[in-house]
Image (cartoon, rainbow, N blue to C red):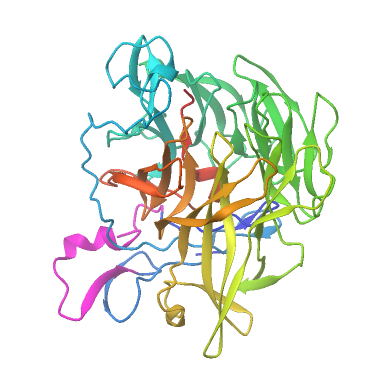
Amino acid sequence: MTKRVVLGALFGALAVLGTGCGDECVDQFDCRDKGAAPAGQEWICNADNKCELQNLVLPPEEDAGTEEDAGTEVDAGAEVDAGTEVDAGTEDAGTEVDAGTDAGMNVAKGDACTASTDCMAGLRCEAATCQSLLIAVTGNDGGTRALVTEYDVPGMTSLSANGVASAYPRFGPDGAQVAFVQGDVTGAAGELAVRPVPLTADAPTVLTTGTAAGGARIRYMEWEPGSLIAWVRGSTGISTIAATGGSPAQATGNGTFPDWAPNGTDYAYSAAGNGIYVSTGGAAPAPLAGSPTSGEQPHYNRTTSQLLFLANPEGTTVNFGTEATPVLKLYSLPVTGGGDPKLLAGTSTRAVEGGSVDSYIANPNWSPDGKWVAYVRANFLLVNNAATLCGNVGAELCGTDRGNDIYVQGVDSSGGKLGEPVLFAENATLPSFSPDGRLVAYIFGGQLVVRAIDPATGAATGTAITHPKDTYTVLTSEGDDHRPRWQPR
């Protein structure tokens, strides 16, 4: 497996999953049909995507490498598959999440409503009744598929026709449409298409192609809450198009990771080596004052004036394989810029025999009320500047440290830390808050998992809703491009 070089940013903690039809497995779950392992051994999925026996003293083997692309940064992360989730994922479709003491949010699934604010957590008012919010992900069933599912009912539906590849599903701001790329999802011939939701039998409407929009692959796409669909043209540069179609427009000549402001017109993005740029009120993008040139992956807070981003101001790098990888921290800064960025999550290090166990931050995401930020802390063994993600073969000195953990951090109105981080999910990645702020979706071992969050403490609560990978394995190999997206309320 080759190294994945990404555009302008380290993607963070993620799993590289096999996509070839000849692969026997993508992780140890797929080896269960081999039967019980001999005493002292277990079945694992090796780097060649084949099932093999391995002594139990070794952790599950994962491929920490990454697929090659044309960008300028390295994605050295790899999601550690922890083996078995506590909850096997047979949540009753009728189970509702407790709405707490919020005003409204008390109408149950299937009951009459006049607005989504009437409905309990995880629901939206659809055709005058409260219905489950949808989640969109990219998965694999022998081919890449853009998928949607009700958050509380396991069973995913492909947005593209049988045999047609698709990826990167994104909901529109009213939640009534979903956009995705279909066909040649890794090349310029890919089509940007939209479908209404709830899904109908009608074929997707194609808006444009990568070829027509500049001759490059469509990726890093974002829509909600924007008034236009935005995406990155292959390696760099952002284009937009209206959901009704027309000619694509070039918004920027460089940059990646676009993110829309709450007003749907302002936007931010990062440009490799130049940091964070912001366009306000239709003006030309300008550097965010006070942000370091290493800044990347900006995210607007939808309630306060803060912008979230990752950065490596000290220029620290380690080598995952042959590629130098920046060791990123998490910061906030007002959208208007100025002042010093506030550190929300830093790196860590502890000495071990012959080296150290260090960590970096990846895949941050705001809660909709702006009071919490979820992120991934990726732990790795560092020996002579050679890094191996914890949980992989060769990283036994990590001890009990896991490769990827999701934390939730309280944030005050000024963008500073409020309290200490809370461990939300172990061995998991790509956290995503529901639009009512009461649920967090994430990926664990190739499965979509949804867990309620205590709005007072940030801790996980209730029973996890797990979508088993009986048909589709949810992908994480392109970082934030594969983060679960929630249907707006």
Magenta stretch holds residue 220:
no
167 up-or-down from 36: above or below: above
Left or right: 63, with 414 as reference point: left
Q: Is residue 198 at least partly visible in the picture?
A: no
Q: Where residue 156 appears, x then y in whole percent?
A: 32, 35
Q: Where residue 468 appears, x then y in whole percent?
A: 27, 46
Magenta stretch holds residue 25:
yes
Q: Which of the pair 398/158 is nearer the observer?
A: 398
Q: Quadrant of residue 35?
A: bottom left
Left or right: 90, with 427 as reference point: left
Q: Which residues are magenta?
A: 19-45
Left or right: 333, with 486 as reference point: right
Q: Quadrant of residue 264?
A: top right
Q: Which of the pair 344/168 is nearer the observer?
A: 344
Residue drawn at the location 67% of the way across and 50% of the way down:
416
86 up-or-down from 211: above or below: below
Left or right: 374, with 90 as reference point: right
Q: Is residue 258 at least partly visible in the picture?
A: yes
Q: Quadrant of residue 90?
A: top left
